[in-house]
Amino acid sequence: GKNYKIAVIAGDGIGKEVVPEGQRVVEAAARRFGFSVDWTEFDWNCDYYARHGRMMPEDGVEQVRGADAIFLGAVGWPTVPDHISTWDLILKLRRELGLYVALRPARLLKGIVSPLAGRTAKDIDFVIVRENSEGEYSAAGGLLYEGTSEEMVIQESVFSKRAIDRILRYAFDLARTRRKKVSLATKSNGIKIAMPYWDARFAAIAREYPDVAHDKFHIDILTAHFVVHPDWFDVVVGSNLFGDILSDLGPAVAGSIGIAPSGNIDPSRTNPSMFEPVHGSAPDIAGQGIANPIGQIWAAAMMLEHLGELEAAKAIETAIESVIGGNGPRTRDLGGNAATVEAGKAIAEALA
Ligand code: NAD
Ligand code: IPM
Ligand code: MN
């Protein structure tokens, strides 16, 4: 069987608790499907920052560039300002490795009860395609007139045609493999320059895909539709910030932020793609061993799918559903009282 070299960055907080469960499940899949994995662990996190004054070594990106994929937990702890821990590690990896697609499915799994009354698995199954390289996440701008009554900050958003078009095409290509519909998150009624431009590029790219239906919604009403009409959506595409917001809301309507996976993808496959849960380091529950490992485990399934281990990926999703749907151990966010490790072990056993 094949051997995969995976760079592991567990990170902070519950990242350190859920990543080993993801690895446990990948190992179980490797045994069953006949491949092997070499894990290389990197201790880059906020403790590393305390020792070195940075989140990773200067050549950190080069250290992981040769891996087949990167498996990341979560980054961020109250000892380091969030904009430093993220820009120095997670956002840096996403940008410098060209991982311009954030692929974030929201699917109501069998056995999970949606907080939306009466909704079942067939009603909630969509994918958020988030622009992952630029936009509102920008370091352009600065503080002006400091100390005067006119003090202000200017923060510029940057939207390139290249980045918009490539993410839109990715969304339409993905829709062709699903239910053939793309919805755009926009705000062209208020964000006067950038969002009418997004609308225009969306209309232009949509013409290349006459077989795919498309519609667009301003981000404000789109959040409401996610709650009231989740069944309307198949592929939802948006800017970096809109995609970020929607990708916490989507999983919340599908049961829990604790189950949601994410792929940071380089579609050209020049660099390793990076797989992580959507959630963060959860300082409020870290250290208690109660975090839900499913987001990390599902992210592992996305990683194996990306690597071409399609059967293993599918089997992990089935194992998650069999444990959750079959009265297996579930963590508190899903209404149970199981520990992280119990939930992870049950999924690994279901796979074996
Ligand atoms: P968070 O996702 O860490 O936590 C939000 C809430 O969801 C908390 O109540 C938490 O307990 C709960 N939660 C999250 N994951 C869970 C899980 N697996 N099981 C059960 N409950 C879970 O978001 P936050 O509080 O906004 O951020 C905390 C830190 O994480 C910050 O430093 C932030 O910058 C960082 N963060 C990192 C990433 C990442 O590394 N990809 C993503 C989001 C936030
Ligand atoms: C996510 C996170 C990150 C983001 C933070 C930690 C910078 O919220 O992966 O969704 O906004 O991209
Ligand atoms: Mn987020």
Image (tube, rainbow, N blue to C red):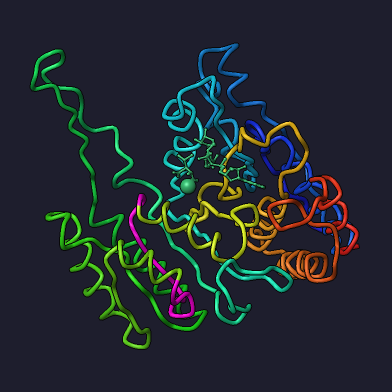
Point out the residue furthest to the bottom here.
211
Count the marks: how many? 0
Residue 13: percent from left, percent from top:
65, 32
- Range of the magenta residues? 228-241
Relative vertical location of residue 147 with respect to residue 23 in this rendering, above or below: above
Relative vertical location of residue 348 with respect to residue 170 in this rendering, above or below: above
Is-magenta flag for residue 108? no
Residue at 18%, 68% in the rendered image? 200
Q: Is residue 308 left or right of residue 266?
A: right
For the residue pair 333 and 138, the one nearer the viewer reads as: 333
Relative vertical location of residue 310 with respect to residue 31 in this rendering, above or below: below
Q: Quadrant of residue 150?
A: top left
Residue 124: percent from left, percent from top:
55, 75
Q: Is residue 306 left or right of residue 155?
A: right
For the residue pair 214 and 222, the one nearer the viewer reads as: 222
Residue at 59%, 69% in the rendered image? 107
Q: Quadrant of the C terminus?
A: bottom right
Point out the residue furthest to the front here.
117
Residue 264: percent from left, percent from top:
51, 51
Q: Is residue 185 left or right of residue 291?
A: left
Q: Quadrant of the N terminus?
A: bottom right
Q: Is residue 85 left or right of residue 109?
A: left
Q: Quadrant of residue 326?
A: bottom right
Is-magenta flag for residue 232? yes
Residue at 45%, 69% in the rendered image? 227
Residue at 62%, 44% in the rendered image? 70
Residue 190: percent from left, percent from top:
16, 57
For the residue pair 18 and 60, the one nearer the viewer reads as: 18
Q: Quadrant of residue 10?
A: top right
